[in-house]
């Protein structure tokens, strides 16, 4: 896979377009802040043993078949329960390796190995086009909203990081993420993480058959904005099953036209990204990394779930019923 060319930032002029591809002038972007996340070097693609069952895009990249039915048969749900729980266990184990000094590439190596040891394929690997995602986990640090590519950047004490694990096994995807502080983060970052976890939880509580999915976005947006934060608009929750991203779309803010009616057996993710400052985002020129325009931090939590006859069943809970990440009860 490609590597990021080494940049001599000292040679950049204030009015040059920023190296990160945001479209802003250097002086308005990375020069404005010494602590914005800087891309490192991406290591070569890690191989997956031939005996592991692969999703259709594993060889040549590609996106999803959008025609997968939203309501899954019971037999698919059983597979999704097993895959979801295995994804959660991997997320927890990679999360336990977070510490100042480790690189996001080392976290990728760990996630990659754990997916294979679990008998599955790391869904992000070679997913998408122009270019396909080159790694097995998304690692999104500080102002990176989502889809951060693991690289040689070292985690620092006081950073926050989201790890997004998706496992493909038994022909279905289990998609889950959580946010942690690296060492000790500032109180506002911890409030952001806690509030984002609460937003995710309130979104999940809004899942009810017969109700429109816009109930979910409303619950999330109300709580985020009451806390003085904003909801990122550009990325949404999604149907998931044999395909990684399919119908329905789940907006994390209220929109009346996000009106799919929830039905028992429907599977999707809820994965709100909450920002301390502005919700607007720019993509780096790697084609994946999405960061806030103002450089302020964001957090995210994600679960895969199924609508039941009277509510919801989470498919990516840990066996003990807990979630990964910070911002929960002290022993979470
Ligand atoms: N897991 C992400 C999600 O929640 C998608 C990552 S796509 C990738 O939808 F290609 F970046 F891995
Ligand atoms: Co997702
Ligand atoms: Co995800």
Image: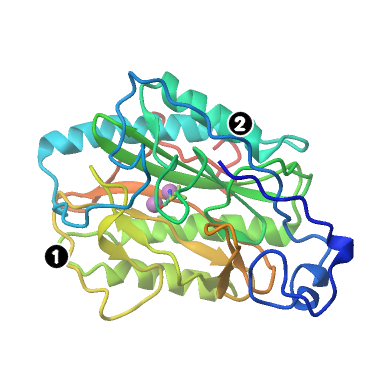
Q: Position of residue 5 (x, y in %)?
A: 71, 50
Residues 296 and 45: in front is 45
In the rendered image, which quarter contains the C terminus? top right
For disc 1, the neighbor class at 10 Å (few under 14, some 14 to 19, many from 20) is some
Q: Secondary structure at mark 2?
A: loop
Which residue is depicted at the point 74% across and 51% down? 185
Q: Which residue is identified by label 2?
A: 96
Q: Position of residue 299 (x, y in %)?
A: 57, 57
Q: Which residue is identified by label 1?
A: 210
In the rendered image, which quarter contains the N terminus? top right
Label located before the other in sequence (1 or 2): 2
Q: Give residue 23's quadrant in the image.
A: bottom right
Q: Give residue 206's quadrant in the image.
A: bottom left
264 relative to 139 in the view: left or right: left
Which residue is depicted at the point 59% across and 34% down? 44
Q: Position of residue 182 (x, y in %)?
A: 71, 43
């Amino acid at each position: 896979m490609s590597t990021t060319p080494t940049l001599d930032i000292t040679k950049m002029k204030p009015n040059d377009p920023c190296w990160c591809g945001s479209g802003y002038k250097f002086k308005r972007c990375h020069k404005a802040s010494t602590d914005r996340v800087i891309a490192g070097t991406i290591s070569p693609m890690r191989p997956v043993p031939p005996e592991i069952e692969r999703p259709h895009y594993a060889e040549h990249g590609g996106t999803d078949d959008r025609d997968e039915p939203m309501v899954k048969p019971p037999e698919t749900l059983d597979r999704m329960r097993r895959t979801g729980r295995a994804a959660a266990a991997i997320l927890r184990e990679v999360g336990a390796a977070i510490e100042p000094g480790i690189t996001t590439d080392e976290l990728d190596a760990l996630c990659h190995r754990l997916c294979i040891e679990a008998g599955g394929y790391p869904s992000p690997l070679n997913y998408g086009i122009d270019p396909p995602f080159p790694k097995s986990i998304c690692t999104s640090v500080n102002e990176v909203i989502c889809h951060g590519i693991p690289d040689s950047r070292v985690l620092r004490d006081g950073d926050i990081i989201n790890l997004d694990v998706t496992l493909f096994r038994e022909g279905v995807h289990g998609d889950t993420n959580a946010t942690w502080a690296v060492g000790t983060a500032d109180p506002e970052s911890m409030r952001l993480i806690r509030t984002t976890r609460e937003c995710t939880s309130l979104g999940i509580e809004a899942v009810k058959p017969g109700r429109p999915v816009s109930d979910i976005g409303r619950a999330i947006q109300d709580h985020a904005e009451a806390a003085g934060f904003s909801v990122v608009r550009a990325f949404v929750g999604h149907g998931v099953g044999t395909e990684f991203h399919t119908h329905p779309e789940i907006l994390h803010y209220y929109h009346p036209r996000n009106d799919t009616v929830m039905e028992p057996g429907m599977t999707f993710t809820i994965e709100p990204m909450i920002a301390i400052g502005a919700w607007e985002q720019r993509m780096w020129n790697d084609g994946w990394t999405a960061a806030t325009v103002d450089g302020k931090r964001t957090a995210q939590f994600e679960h895969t779930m199924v609508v039941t006859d009277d509510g919801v069943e989470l498919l990516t809970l840990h066996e003990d019923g807990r979630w990964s990440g910070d911002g929960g009860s002290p022993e979470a």
